[in-house]
Amino acid sequence: MTNLKNTPHVQALFLLLIAMISMQSSGSLAKILFNQFPIMTVSSLRLLLGSIILALIFKIWQVNFKQVRWKAIVSYGMALAGMNALFYLSIDRLPLGIAVSFEFIGPLSVALFYARQKFDFVWVGLAVLGLALLFPFDQASQSLDPLGIAFALGAGACWALYIVAGQKPSGISGNHTVCLGMFVGMLCLLPIALLTGMPAAVFEPSNFIFFIALAILASALPFSLEMMALRNLSALSFGTLMSVEPAIAALSGFVFLGEQLLWTQWLALTVIIAASIGCTVTTQKAKK
């Protein structure tokens, strides 16, 4: 018989899985858009359209803005802006799965910080092993761009801040927090996009529809689901379970961009998933 007390936790895991699939699929779409449009244009429009979509869905005008804790919203929005822009800059120079692997150092650091039980370190260690296997060490002919690695590491640092900031009370619902946070993030990026040049072709219907799709897949959907998942997952569980992100990114790059996987990277998928399952099982037992 199903234990009803575990239902919120299971739902949170399901929401997080959908968020990761949506986010990493959007990475392939963004990389395709880079062939026509500047990276900062893609990044800022992603947040702008995402915030507008959420504002309409969750009726942002009903928020009591006197209750909003703007310090939490601004820190969350700035982390979002940095994570989005730096990640896009990194995947322009690195394969999608490799960029996410470097980026994952951020949330993995959060998981290590909150680790308490001995098994927690085992699962985090497995996640680290999986990330190492995901890196194409034997592809010497395909050297990795150092600047791309730096961008990915910077995105990881912002990702860690995003996890911490997302757990701080904002005075409003999680959905409204995401909406306002994305709007703040857009305000950080849009001036840069305008200064570096935003092509008018962006607003042509045939192109604009792709930016709307990107906003839904990369911002509106995953950030909302992650915010809901954070309510019923510990920081350790969230950080370690996000280890599935590089695996999903590698698969997305393979399916949509033709980025080939090595046998060691397929092994990495198994190791990372094992770490995620192990973390889930031990966390559930600890609650009983």
Image (cartoon, rainbow, N blue to C red):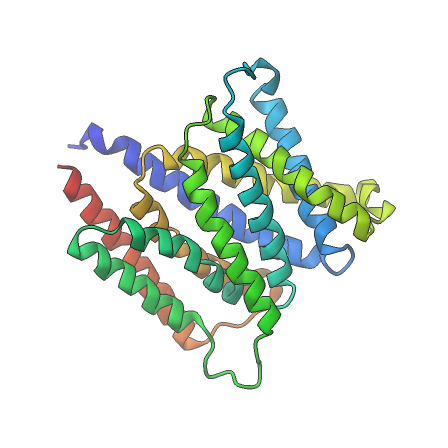
Q: Is residue 244 left or right of residue 208?
A: left
Name the spot of residue 16 as percent of width and height, x first.
41, 42
Residue lying at the far right in this picture: please name it.
Answer: 200
In the rendered image, the quadrant that contains the C terminus is: top left
In the foreground, 186 or 274: 186
List x then y, in percent, for residue 25: 55, 52
**Quadrant occupied by the N terminus:** top left
Residue drawn at point x = 64 percent, y = 59 percent? 89
Q: Is residue 224 above or below residue 122?
A: above
The spot of residue 64 in percent (x, y) is 54, 14
Q: Is residue 95 visible?
A: no
Q: Is residue 117 above or below residue 188?
A: below
- The mark tally for this picture is 0
Q: Relative to 76, does residue 88 appear above or below in the rendering?
A: below
In this view, the residue in front, 32 or 75, is 75
Q: Residue at x 38, y 64 (%)?
A: 269
Quadrant housing residue 38: bottom right
Q: Please give the name of the residue rendered at 27% of the width and 64% of the height, measured from the top-left corner.
A: 125
Any part of residue 202 in sight? yes
Judged from this view, the residue extending furthest toward the left is: 288
Residue 130 in the image, given as x and y percentages of width and height: 35, 67
